[in-house]
Image (cartoon, coloured by chain):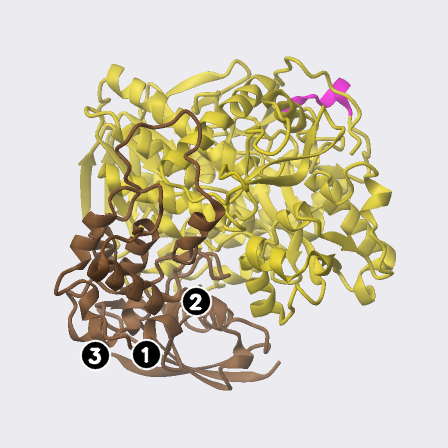
């Protein structure tokens, strides 16, 4: 049975970006808005962010948006678009004040202002040393942002469709977005949501890799749907590995531990980051620290020769750990049986954040081609989008900032668009493609389980498309992913029921992960240089002459992938060698 | 790897008239989470097993269920702590949709009933509202809630009376009642000063024991009761 709903604006995803957009849309009396989310919104992965949100509030020491912008550009290895970065760093200040006004319980300074602490890659005077820029609420800043935004959505009376999995975007023949198709998980029914504007804010896809900080739900649904609908994906080769995940589990240990003074040590007890980043040491940017850890491990200086090093916070004292890092302490005690007050934490880099995604302009409008041609009515924000403010490597605290700055901008521009535009007619049979996909998944009664394919994908991606990459390894990975895509047609879904069929849902999600793994690997194989998080052992240097440009990958009608490029926007900061 | 037996209370509304127990044997490391064991079953033995899960480290609140009779997050309990025979059942007090999945709508309706959002209709300052570290600390504990429902569904008063607003909603009211920046404490206290408000609480402490975030829930409820009886929260 197919149900139809009509709205002006739809927000797909109930994390930080989506909820911020929804709050702004809800302030428009004539714009009917709904949020469609695969999870109850408070389950979204924004809630797992820990250490803070960046803004040059200068509550504890001198700071300026221009310094923040420089750090972000440098962190991006000069691949970020500087006009968008400047806008983000300037709007950081009012938007964080706005969050406080919405009730967000930030930690406080001695004089009652929003507390701030140092974070990786954030500096004063254009790289001279660490600056306290990360605004935080203990080590659950993301949780507090998610809760505060959800609370404000309730206050505003936003319509929610919870546990509705959006499975397709509806585009008209003349290239306008006119809604989405969603699958109501509880009933198994399809719903067509007809609207003037749609924003994808569906988060990232860390589940492509085996060691990840990402939730099970982070399967890149919005990005994969866009790809299949013929939109380009931008800079997919740039995927961030966070330096400090809990050994084997990948659970995030915030950079805030190092911001508070924690240090990394190898098997000799050496504070090895001093060798790799003489000025910023343990607070160098994430790509630099993850590579250093990987190198220590590979050269035999992992703890006991194993694949981890220590994050040592024992010198910080119980009070700092219990008050400023209570969740971290809880994770270590629960999952490792380690008390970080007394013992160092075993950590390894963990797949964490997609710098790439659906290309947008600085107002979150989805764009195609080298000229940034706007696709009317379609928007993307947050990790799903590639504005690009993170370029080749994102700085810590800039993801939460991205969510609220661009969530706000997306909401504002969607409202404008909805006031001006009419409701486009729905094309015929908008659910056809979805019914075909689901039909394929339910056709097999014998075959491999999706989990087996997922595990094989995660292993090859971890080994060959991780922190260090080679042409040979990625060629192997690409062939493997394509083999898995072929085998995917024969997976068997054991649950044949309609209601709450998460077996079917997981199989569908695997299709997304495989498509994104393919684009990631192809983009990475194609880029014959090293930049930010993309480190190739066969091309170790950054190559600005040939590669100071964004990658765009588009799926053709025959299923093949086409690669094109677009220029990077450079305003104030010319590319320089990157040293921390 | 050691073998464990997971005994699961199954119910599929499309095929079953009533719930039944089914046992699965899995290999699990002592440091695996119960969620990992459930995943092993779902992925490789029986794809029909149904439960919610997302972050897998105790932050998103999706996978609250009864594990050996106690409300826990499946991702925050390790196999070494539950023995070789583990019983897994859905939360009590909400309608079971399928296996571990219960109907959360009544829970979120309770949450929404206590004005769970910041209210201050006064003039908005240019910069942040100031708040001392001590005033911020006053409600720190109740900001930790992840709305997993482990507390409410462990509460005998709630089992007996589904209209009781329940501990989770009170925790979320407490978070604003004791926030010096908020101006609607009295409205929330009036809502909770009801037969189905805080007075249904009999100080049983099940909620406190069930909370995966270790919020002192019974204490928070007590503070709300006191604020109703002896005047405003911040007197």
Is there any visible trace of residue A230 in the rendered image? no
Q: Residues within 10 Å of mark 3 (few under 14, many from 20)?
A: few
Mark drawn on residue B79: none
| Labels 2, 1: one chain | yes
Query: In this orientation, which residue lies closer to the viewer: A468 or A42?
Result: A42
Q: Residues within 10 Å of mark 1 (few under 14, many from 20)?
A: some
User: Percent from the top left, x then y, of residue A410?
Assistant: 39, 26
Query: In this orientation, which residue lies closer to the viewer: A54 or A160?
Result: A54
Q: Tell me the residue that label 1 is attached to.
A: B9
- Helix, strand or loop at label 2? It is loop
Residue A10's image quarter?
A: top left
User: Percent from the top left, x then y, of residue A443?
Assistant: 36, 57
- Give the alpha-carbon distance from disc 2 to disc 1, as whole Å: 22 Å
- Give the alpha-carbon distance from disc 1 to disc 3, as whole Å: 10 Å
Q: What residue sits 52% from the left and 26% below the top?
A: A387
Is there any visible trace of residue A305 in the rendered image? yes
- Helix, strand or loop at label 3? It is loop
Q: Is residue A10 above or below residue A336?
A: above
Q: Which residues are magenta?
A: A543-550
Q: What residue sits 21% from the left and 51% below the top?
A: B188
Q: What tint does the image give chain A? A: yellow
User: Percent from the top left, x then y, of residue A438?
Assistant: 35, 50
Query: Closer to the N terminus: mark 1 or mark 3?
Result: 1
Q: Tell me the residue that label 2 is attached to.
A: B212
Which chain, by letter, is brown? B
Relative to A548, is A143 on the left or the right? left
- Give the alpha-carbon distance from disc 2 to disc 3, as whole Å: 30 Å
Query: Closer to the N terminus: mark 2 or mark 3?
Result: 3
Q: Is residue A359 above or below residue A236?
A: above
Q: Tell me the residue that label 3 is attached to.
A: B18
Label 3 marks a residue whose chain is: B
Q: Are marks 1 and 3 in contact (CB under 8 Å)?
A: no
């Amino acid at each position: 049975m197919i149900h139809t709903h009509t709205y002006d604006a739809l927000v797909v995803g109930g994390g930080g970006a989506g909820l911020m957009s929804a709050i702004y849309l809800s302030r428009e009396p004539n714009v009917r808005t709904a949020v469609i989310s695969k999870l109850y919104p408070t389950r979204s992965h924004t809630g797992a962010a820990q250490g803070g949100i960046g803004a040059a509030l200068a509550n504890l020491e001198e700071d300026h948006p221009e310094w923040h912008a420089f750090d972000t550009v440098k962190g991006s290895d000069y691949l970020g678009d500087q006009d968008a970065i400047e806008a983000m760093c300037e709007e950081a200040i009012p938007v964080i004040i706005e969050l406080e006004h919405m009730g967000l319980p930030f930690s406080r300074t001695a004089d009652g202002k929003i507390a701030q602490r140092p974070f990786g890659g954030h500096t004063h005077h254009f790289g001279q040393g660490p600056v306290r820029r990360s605004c935080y609420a203990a080590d659950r800043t993301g949780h507090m942002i998610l809760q505060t935004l959800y609370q404000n959505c309730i206050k505003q009376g936003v319509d929610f469709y919870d546990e509705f999995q959006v499975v397709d975007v509806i585009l008209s023949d003349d290239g306008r977005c006119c809604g989405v198709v969603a699958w109501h998980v509880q009933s198994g029914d399809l719903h067509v949501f007809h609207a003037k504007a749609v924003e994808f804010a569906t988060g990232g896809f860390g589940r492509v890799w085996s060691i990840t900080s990402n939730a099970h739900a982070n399967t890149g649904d919005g990005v994969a749907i866009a790809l299949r609908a013929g939109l380009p994906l931008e800079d997919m080769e740039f995927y961030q590995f966070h330096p400090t995940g809990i050994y084997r589990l990948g659970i995030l240990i915030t950079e805030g531990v190092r911001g508070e003074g924690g240090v990394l040590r190898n098997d000799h007890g050496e504070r090895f980051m001093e060798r790799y980043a003489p000025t910023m040491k343990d607070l160098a940017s994430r790509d630099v620290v993850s590579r250093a850890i990987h190198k220590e491990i590979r050269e035999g200086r992992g703890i006991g020769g194993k694949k981890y090093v220590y994050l040592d916070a024992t010198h910080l004292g119980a009070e700092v750990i219990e008050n400023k890092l209570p969740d971290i302490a809880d994770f270590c005690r629960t999952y490792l049986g380690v008390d970080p007050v007394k013992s160092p934490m075993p950590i390894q880099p963990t797949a964490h954040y997609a710098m790439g995604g659906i290309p947008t302009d600085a107002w979150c409008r989805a764009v195609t081609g080298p000229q940034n041609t706007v696709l009317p009515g379609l928007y993307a924000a947050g990790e799903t989008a590639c504005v690009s403010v993170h370029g080749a490597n994102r700085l810590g605290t800039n993801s939460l900032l991205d969510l609220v700055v661009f969530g706000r901008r997306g909401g504002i521009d969607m409202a404008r668009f909805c006031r001006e535009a009419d409701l486009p007619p729905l094309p015929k049979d908008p659910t056809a493609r979805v019914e075909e996909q689901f039909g394929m998944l339910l056709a097999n009664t014998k075959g491999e389980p999706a989990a087996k394919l997922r595990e094989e994908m995660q292993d090859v991606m971890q080994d060959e498309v991780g922190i260090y990459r080679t042409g040979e390894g990625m060629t192997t990975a690409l062939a493997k992913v394509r083999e898995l895509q072929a085998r995917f047609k024969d997976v068997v879904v054991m649950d044949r029921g309609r209601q709450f069929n998460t077996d079917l849902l997981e199989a569908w999600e695997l299709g997304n992960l495989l498509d994104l793994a393919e684009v990631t690997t192809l983009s990475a194989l194609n880029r014959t240089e090293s930049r930010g998080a993309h480190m190739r052992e066969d091309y170790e240097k950054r190559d600005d002459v040939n590669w100071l440009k964004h990658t765009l990958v588009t799926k053709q009608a025959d299923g093949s992938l086409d690669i094109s490029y677009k220029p990077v926007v450079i305003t104030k900061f010319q590319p320089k060698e990157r040293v921390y | 790897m050691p073998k464990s037996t997971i005994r699961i209370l199954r119910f599929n509304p499309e095929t079953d008239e009533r719930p039944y127990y089914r046992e699965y044997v899995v290999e699990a490391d002592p440091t695996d989470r119960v969620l990992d064991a459930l995943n092993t079953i779902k992925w490789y033995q029986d794809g029909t097993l149904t439960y919610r899960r997302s972050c897998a480290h105790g932050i998103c609140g999706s996978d609250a269920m009864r594990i050996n009779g106690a409300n826990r997050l499946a991702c925050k309990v390790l196999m070494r702590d539950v023995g070789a025979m583990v019983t897994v059942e859905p939360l009590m007090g909400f309608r079971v949709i399928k296996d571990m999945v219960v109907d959360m709508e009544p829970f979120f309706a309770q949450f929404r009933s206590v004005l769970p959002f910041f209210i201050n209709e006064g003039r908005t300052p240019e910069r942040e509202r100031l708040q001392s570290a001590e005033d911020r600390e006053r409600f720190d504990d109740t900001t930790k809630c992840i709305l997993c429902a482990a507390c409410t569904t462990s509460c005998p008063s709630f089992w007996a009376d589904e209209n009781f607003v329940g501990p989770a909603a009170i925790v979320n009211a407490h978070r604003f009642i004791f926030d010096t920046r908020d101006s609607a404490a009295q409205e929330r206290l009036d809502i909770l000063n009801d037969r189905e408000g805080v007075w249904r609480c009999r100080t049983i402490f099940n909620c406190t024991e069930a909370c995966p975030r270790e919020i002192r829930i019974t204490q928070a409820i007590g503070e709300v009761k006191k604020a109703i009886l002896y005047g405003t929260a911040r007197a």
